Each structure stands twice: as C-alpha cells, then as structure tokens.
Image (cartoon, grey):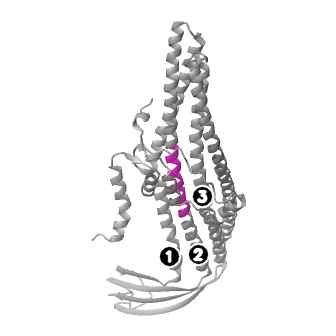
Amino acid sequence: MIMWSNIMRWAPGVLLVCMASLPAAAGDLSETWRLAELGDPTWRAAIHEQRAAAEARPQAWAPFLPQVSANAGYTYTRQNILSSDNRVFARGRSNFPTADYALTLEQSIWNYTNWATLRKARATVGASEASLEAARQDMLLRAAERYFFTVAALESLVSIQSEKRAVGRLRDVARARQRDGTVRGTEALDAEARFLQVEARELEAAANLRDGLQGLREITGREYDRLRPLTAVLASRGPDTREPRQWVSRALENNPRVTALRLGVQAATAEVTRQESEYLPRVGAVVQHERRRSDGSLFGGGSDVESQWGMVRLTVPLFNGGMTYSRVREARELLAKTNNEALAEERAVERRALNSLNGVMTAMSRVRALRAAVQAKERSMESWQVAYRSGAAPSLAVLEAERDLFFNRAELVRARHQYVMDTLRLKHAVGGLTPDDLESFNILLDPAEIAVGPYVAVR
C-alpha cells in the first residue's frame, strides 16, 4: 500500500516529467518563477539539504533517551582434556552447545556533551531554515534575471533588425545614386560599412537570445517559443525610502543569509563547548538481563543460568592521546572562520543593498532622460529624412540620425530592465523578495507576445 507521504514525495518528480513532455509554450515572468519553483535543480537541492540538516535535532535528543540493545549467541564446543591437575577431570572428551542472550538498557544520567550537542543542533537547524529561505529568494531572483535577460535580448534584436532594414534602404539608395553619379562613392561605402556593423550586432543579439532561452530552460525544464516584453510605459515609483542607512539596517536585520551565518556562529560556539566538555566526568546507568544455557561444561554437567544486574557508572576522562586537545583547537579555529564569514557576508550585503538602491535611482533618472531623448531623436530623424529626399542633406547625416535614434531606443530598453532588476535585487538584499514582487512586474509585461522562433534562426 502506497502511503500518502510517499505520494507527496514523488509528486514533484512526476510533475517535472509531465512538464518535460509538454510542447513549447508562451512564457511570462509568473510562469517562469512557478516552473522554477518545481524544476530548478539548485532550489530542489537546497530543499533536500535543509531536510537533511533538520535531522540534527532528533539526533541530538537521542543520547538523552534510553539506549536498548539485545544480543544472542550460539556456541558449539568440542573439548578434549589432555591433562589437568583436577583428578576428577584428568582425562576425557566433551562436546556440548551453549546458547545465551542478553538485554541491556543504558541511560545517561549526566553528560554535558549531550547538552552542548543539543544547543549546536538547534542553531544548525535554524541556520538551515534561514539558508533555505535565502535559496528560495535566490531562485526567485534567478528566475527574474533569466527572464528579463532573455526579453532584453529579444527586444534588442527586434530593434537592431528595424535599424538594419532602415540602413539597408539607405544603402540601396546610395548605391543607385552612385551608379547615376549623383553622390560620391564614399557615401555608398559608408552606408555599406554601417550595414555590416548592424549585421554584426544582430548576430551578437541573436546569440544572446539563444543563450537566454537556454538559461530559462536550465531553471524551468521548459522550452519557450514566445515571450512578453516590458511595456513601453513603465511605472517608476521608486523605493519607499531613499535613505541608505535604512536599507542597510533592513539588510543586516532581515537578510536570511546573514541570519544563517549568525546562527552558524552560534553552532560553532556550541561545538567548541561540546569538545571542551569531553574533559568532564560522565555518569550513566546500565541494567542487564542475561540467560545462559549450556548442555555441558569443563566440569561435566550442563547449566541454565538467568541473571540480572544493574550498575551506576562514573567515567572520568584522563588522557586519550591528545585527541581532545586537538579537537578543541580545531573547533576554535572553525569558530574564528565562521565569525569572519559572517562579517564578510554582512559587508557584502551592505554593499549589495547600497548598489541596488543607487541602481534603482539611476535607472529611474535614465528612463526619464532617455524617453525625452528618443522623442527628440525621432523628430530629428524625420527632419533629416525630409532633407535627404529633397537633396538638401547627405545620406551620412541620415545614417547618423538613425544610429542615434536606435542607440537611444536600445539604451531606454536597457534602463527599463535595469530599473526592474535593481528593484528586485534591492528587495533580495534586504531579505524581502517574494513572489508578489515578481507578480507586480509581471502585470507590466506587454499583453502582445513575440514569437522567438524567427529571431533564434538568425545566424
């Protein structure tokens, strides 16, 4: 009969197999993090690691409980007395079996090592739970990074192909005018060079798109054939406070990785105490019931003996070859190492929080500036195109205007994605990244999906 707990244990694996058999489908940020929650191997490994670490608590309680053991044996003896000072049994042969069994109960009465082990286990389990929360937030951030990296590559490729078509038209016109002798050959060569540069950027963007799609498959186990880019209008509300010290304080207080390392320091401190407690005496009780039945003996007759005994035992460690001294030194060094790791993580989290806050503020400013720049460049390009068609401007001026326009469009796309990711990284740094944060950006995605197949095929 299959137990319900086994069904729940197998369910994620069954879901992954089912997802792997599904055809490629459209994807948005919401679907990406949900699939990553089920299929990201790094996240699933963290879950199993935490479950294994949680066993430290029952293992630490075990020495406080009675230890019961049973043993049984069967012995067949073949005996030949060659000589003996006992005149009764001076000579003779004897073959006989012996059966015995014993039931032993041991109970620790006082052992300080057990208490130190229990304190270490509590800190270890707490650290594992904090590490699992850190891994969950890492998974959410990783899913968002992979998705927006891929979307940015797709948007960049779409923009570059638009630029390529525009430059291609100017190149064709320049070639035709060169054949007519109405423009110099340098203009046609310049247009050809610009076209080749755009082609090179197109290949690079297509490679980034393929890499992004592979990154999505890595964490979700799913192929994506359509994506939803960010809308042109992105709500840039900004963080709830712009005071750096408040964000640093939140990060040091709530970041789960910092919490895990601080609990790791407690566990390492308990380990030092546990090793030092090996110097202390230990008191325990032993109770045993034993029965031994033999069909013969050295003295002739058999026996069936049943006995019970109890003992209170005091153990005083004296010297064990320097093992305890060495383990204490080792534990102290590991404690110093853990203290420095915790300090390093606190400083790193502080830096990440400040960098993310600065990134959010910078991205908001860049989005506003680039929106205005794109509008200005669009009008400028229209003016140059009119002038070019009337013969009042060279093609080089139009190419420069188009390059500036598409450059600013690409920078605007990059700034919008920077704003989204730095906002999520700021939440991640302070330990507050949740699925709701991803959903708040998912609703800002464009409802119109873009099929990635034609763009992936660019070689």
Circle 2 packing at 10 Å, graded few (<14), some (14-19), many (20+), is many
The answer to whether 18 appears left or right of 118 in the picture is left
Range of residues picked out in magenta:
132-150
Location of residue 175 with respect to 200 vertically, above or below? above
Location of residue 340 with respect to 185 vertically, above or below? below
Name the amino acid, label 1: Pro
Location of residue 399 with respect to 337 vertically, above or below? above
Query: Can residue 337 be seen in this snapshot?
Result: no
Badge 2 or badge 3: first in the primary sequence: 2
* Predominant secondary structure, magenta span: helix
Q: Quadrant of residue 115?
A: bottom right
Q: Outermost residue toward the left?
A: 1
Badge 1 or badge 3: first in the primary sequence: 1
Circle 3 packing at 10 Å, graded few (<14), some (14-19), many (20+), is many
Instruction: Name the residue that disc number 1 marks.
Output: 58
Q: CA distance from mark 1 to mark 3?
A: 35 Å
Query: Can residue 6 be seen in this snapshot?
Result: yes
Q: Position of residue 90 (x, y in %)?
A: 39, 87
Q: Quadrant of residue 37?
A: bottom left
Circle 1 packing at 10 Å, graded few (<14), some (14-19), many (20+), is few
Judging depth in this view, the residue of 145 and 442 nearest the camera is: 442
Q: Outermost residue toward the top?
A: 181
- Write the residue at 60% across / 53% down: 423
- Mark number displayed over residue 427: 3
Indicate the secondary structure of the residue bearing disc 1. helix
Judging depth in this view, the residue of 333 and 134 nearest the camera is: 134
The answer to whether 400 appears left or right of 172 in the picture is right
Instruction: Name the residue that disc number 2 marks.
Output: 117
Quarter of the image containing the C terminus?
Answer: top left
